[in-house]
Image: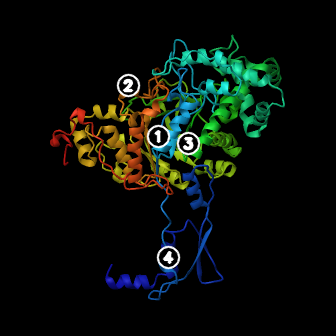
Amino acid sequence: VTKGSRSRHLQNTSPHLIFSKMASLVAGMVSWSAETSFRRVTLSGKSKSTSRYCSSISRARSSQLTVRYALPKIGDPVQEGYTEMLPAERAPRRAGVIMHPTSLPGPYGIGDMGKEAISFIDWLADAKMQVWQVLPLVPPGRPIPGFREDYWSPYSGRDAHCGNTLMISLDELVNDGLLSENELPPPCNHTGNVVFAKVAETNEPLIAQAARRLLERPKEDPMRIAFATWRSRAENRSWLEDAALFDCICKEPELCGKDWWDWPEPLRSRDSTVLQEKCVEFAASIEEFCATQYLFDKQWLSLKEYANSRGISIIGDMPIYVGGHSADVWAHQSLFLLGLDYRPKSVAGVPPDAFSEDGQLWGNPLYDWEAHAKENYSWWSGRIGRALQLHDEVRIDHFRAFAAYWSVPADAKTAKSGSWMVGPGEDFFKGVYSVVGDAPIVAEDLGVITEDVVGLREAIDAPGMVVLQFAWGGDSRSPHLPHNHYENSFCYPGTHDNQTTQGWFESLDDATKVRLASYAAISDVEEASWGMIRLGMSSVSRTCVFTMQDVLCLGDEARMNTPGVADGNWAWRVGSPGFFMTCKPQAKKLRKLATLFERIHQDDSSNDARLLDTSLDVDTAQGTVSNPKKRFLGMF
């Protein structure tokens, strides 16, 4: 195009159109005023959250800002106040730690919701962290003799709404007068990994006893009144009764170990007369189940309230699929792709890739999305609403399945024979948001991510994920490389499904280590874990989250989960009671990094020069800086 033709093109272009493109940079929703020669720009939306971070995002979304711009003429003076028309303020940045409550210290073989959880929150606050991310709080899957002997996955629970009662603090039950001190078991396994079977054998009878004592209290007792109020709430009744009855039926001796679709016909078809008879038969057990769930909620919500008071937002984790043998599928059969024999017709998984030539066969029943759409996704609204009772924000695992999901025939031996099917897309979120509001969702968008997944995530304005361990495979376009990060994202050095960063670094070849050193000065001098935490903190991602294992520079002996391996996962624990009192040096280092990279509360008065001293804390006893040539590899 010649200079003259370009000038003629601009002269013939409507100033309205030119300004429209300018205004679209600062406005999400635009409307024209036909009566006046003004451009009206409106930013609108709504959100809700309890954390400071989400509140600030919500204020930005919910502000009703109308700016009146006179339609411009080229060469005219700009309107009055032009230099005050600044871009929107950047959303606050933050950082935090991912650690499941079962990994906390505890006196009875497992992390619980007692005083050690309070100590951890205090430690997070001292480190200027603003996030505690947890794994699913649901009751974990349980072992099946002869098939999976040590399987306690929180991603394979029997109910998507219930809480894991193994996390109930026995000491807090004593404080509530529901147990006596002489009933407590001897303190055990202070430092080792969780032995879930032993914990269940020891703790569950005591928790059941506490629930029965709650039910035995007079109806005018304050805790009994609180329980009755909790149970009567519609949002709890919607899942509690079915979950309680399902649990009772599962424990019948002749049905123990059987999937619900192998139960007698009247039970699997949910014959109303038979179910009513079972409710009468199991009335006492149903009450006990409900009381136990109340005790979980009571302790967890108290802990959440304390975390929020310390400026900590709790981020939950929601697997997109639910277990086939679950109260959810049994009670809502029409919402899943089941055959006439009640068994799943198709199951979930992921296709073959560079890591698995057979793909991954998960086995969860798939949703009948048409049936969900007909009821405006009400079951999902209840599920997400429940999650937002327990957390401030929720990460949805395998988010990509909302765009398209891998469907595998139920009788397939591997996931190879599956095929891609279209998911519900944005319609799903419109239905959910119409009930629960603008829910603060984090999209786990790892794996094979196509443009429709990115488009869906951006359409609902959900942050995605980047993982630093995935960045060094040689693809310069990798979204996990720090220079390719985007602001609306969560940055992780590694997640609970990865090797610990120290274990990962030790397994790298020399060429990758040189690249890491050249790119970000990461080596075994600083300790690779802290180098990757530093790199994550420096990312443009609004949120940076790292595992507690990385904070402690632990190797793969502390790995939380190895995908594809059924046994031996989920058991890692951080240390013995009082452990966080020994972690002040780590809190200090995190505090320095959070301050340097502006990941602290904006109103935090401790942002001073002392905290900005980011010099390395070097262990000179190990001689790690005695030879300057060994300080860094590569270009450094």
Between 193 and 13, the one lying in front of the other is 193
Residue bearing the label numbered 4: 84
Q: Is residue 181 placed above or below 21 in the rendered structure? A: above
Q: Secondary structure at mark 2?
A: helix
Question: What's the distance in space between the residues labelled 4 and 1, CA to CA?
Answer: 38 Å
Question: What's the distance in space between the residues labelled 2 and 3, CA to CA?
Answer: 26 Å
Pick whichever of labels 1 and 2 is earlier in the sequence. 1
Pick whichever of labels 4 and 1 is earlier in the sequence. 4
**Mark 4 neighbour class, 10 Å CA radius: few under 14, some 14 to 19, many 20 or more:** few
Q: Could you tell me residue 392's position as x and y percent?
A: 59, 45
Pick whichever of labels 2 and 4 is earlier in the sequence. 4
Question: What's the distance in space between the residues labelled 2 and 4, CA to CA?
Answer: 56 Å
Q: Which mark is residue 557?
A: 2
Residue bearing the label numbered 1: 97
Decide if residue 444 is in sight here.
no
Q: Are marks 3 and 4 in contact (CB under 8 Å)?
A: no
Q: Are marks 2 and 3 in contact (CB under 8 Å)?
A: no
Q: Quadrant of the N terminus?
A: bottom left
Pick whichever of labels 2 and 3 is earlier in the sequence. 3
**147 left or right of 506 in image:** right
**Mark 3 neighbour class, 10 Å CA radius: few under 14, some 14 to 19, many 20 or more:** many
Decide if residue 586 is in sight here.
yes
> Callout 3, which amino acid?
Ile
Q: Could you tell me residue 69's position as x and y percent?
A: 55, 79
Residue bearing the label numbered 3: 314
**507 left or right of 14 in image:** left
